[in-house]
Amino acid sequence: MIPFSPPRIDQAVIDEVTAALQSGWITTGPRTKQFEKEISAYCNAKTTIAVSSWTTGMEVLLRWWGVGPGDEVILPVYTYCASANVILHTGATPVFVDVNAADFNLSLEKVAEKITAKTKVIMPVDLGGLPCDYAELYKLIEQKKDLFKAASPQQEKLGRILLAADAAHSFGALYQGKRVGSIADITVFSFHAVKNLTTAEGGAISFHLPADFDHNEIYKTFNIKILHGQSKDALAKTQKGAWRYDVLEPGFKCNMTDIQAAIGLIELGRYQENLDRRKQIFEQYDHAFKNTSWAWTPLYENQEKISSYHLYQLRIKEITEAQRDAIIQEIFEHDVAVNVHFQPLPLLSAYKNLGYQITDFPQAYANYSTEISLPVYYDLNDEQVKQVIAAVLASVEKILNL
């Protein structure tokens, strides 16, 4: 069976993790701090804090920003549940918008319709690794600036809706020549096991707020918030005579460990070769499918955007959800694992029970019901790519009687 998205665990990763274990320091320490610095340098972010997951990172961020009951956060309905779960955790309301037909990202027109005086954050999702239309989102935010009502010191300083990007898929992607992480006000990355760059579990928050924000102070604040509100981390407390600490607030526990950062440092050091290989696989899929009558191949590069090539989201034209499911099952019969990204949130019980209805988001459903994500990862060799292609072609032809 060709797996869908295994992590790249080779001797270089094993050696660095072993070195971290043998160092005697396995929780947050020098490797985590180095990883943060290298992420900031790679993305051209003003500062970065490493965390235990995208989910915890975004929740801490929203709470620091002052998002809470009565507030609204706009995001695409076509995303993983974590994007909306963290909004609900704060007591705020997720305001879903439909997506584009072309690229799975949120519809600017729908965002414009949903901005109100309650809107505190817009959370675009770079689905599959393709950046959203950030410049147009900033224009929208500026146009609606008179509606904005600040409810925290940070909101007062910014004076407008915050653009907080869900870049779980788009580490390494480019928009108008800028790396994701230096475009939105704040960007949250995921380094989960299936992501392009993994730390097994983990994530990072990269800050690129306007100049009047003190990013050194933000970094210090978040180090406190992600470690119970303690005034010192474990490494600082080991210094001579430095055992005493204070708890400044009832914080969270979501720091990254040096074991995780050890994986991340190796991954980041060779990340370009990872992107290059993923692009080659995308191009091979495109070459195989683009001239068929039934395939809608994904957008992954144009004059403004270059994807991180995280997901190859193939769509089959004019089929039903049941036919799509049958094609997937047939592909598995050819010993190839595929997936679907994602189920729009109103299809899930938790969000259906909150009153959200999929009929309000026809494009999201149309995209979902025809989508199949194909394997893309560094160690997928050309012969395996050919096997994936053959499995897809045979399965589509069988189910659709072509």
Image (cartoon, rainbow, N blue to C red):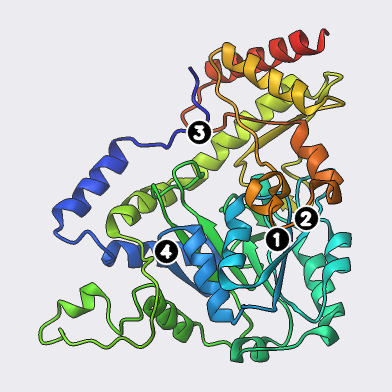
Percent across and percent down for residue 266 are 36, 48
Of pointers 2 and 1, the one earlier in the residue sequence: 2
**Residue placed under numbered mark 4 in the picture:** 51
Helix or strand or loop: what does disc 2 sit on?
Answer: loop
* In-front residue for pair 90/183: 90
Q: Residue 106 carries which label?
A: 2
Q: Which amino acid does label 2 sit on?
A: Leu
Left or right of 367 in this view: 267: left
Percent across and percent down for residue 44 are 55, 67
Percent across and percent down for residue 117 are 80, 82
In this rendering, does residue 306 appear at all? Answer: no
Q: How far apart are marks 1 and 3 (CA)?
A: 24 Å
Who's the residue at 61% across and 66% down the image?
Answer: 88
Q: Distance between the residues labelled 3 and 4?
A: 22 Å
Left or right of 153 in this view: 240: left
Disc 2 vs disc 1: Cβ atoms closer than 8 Å?
yes
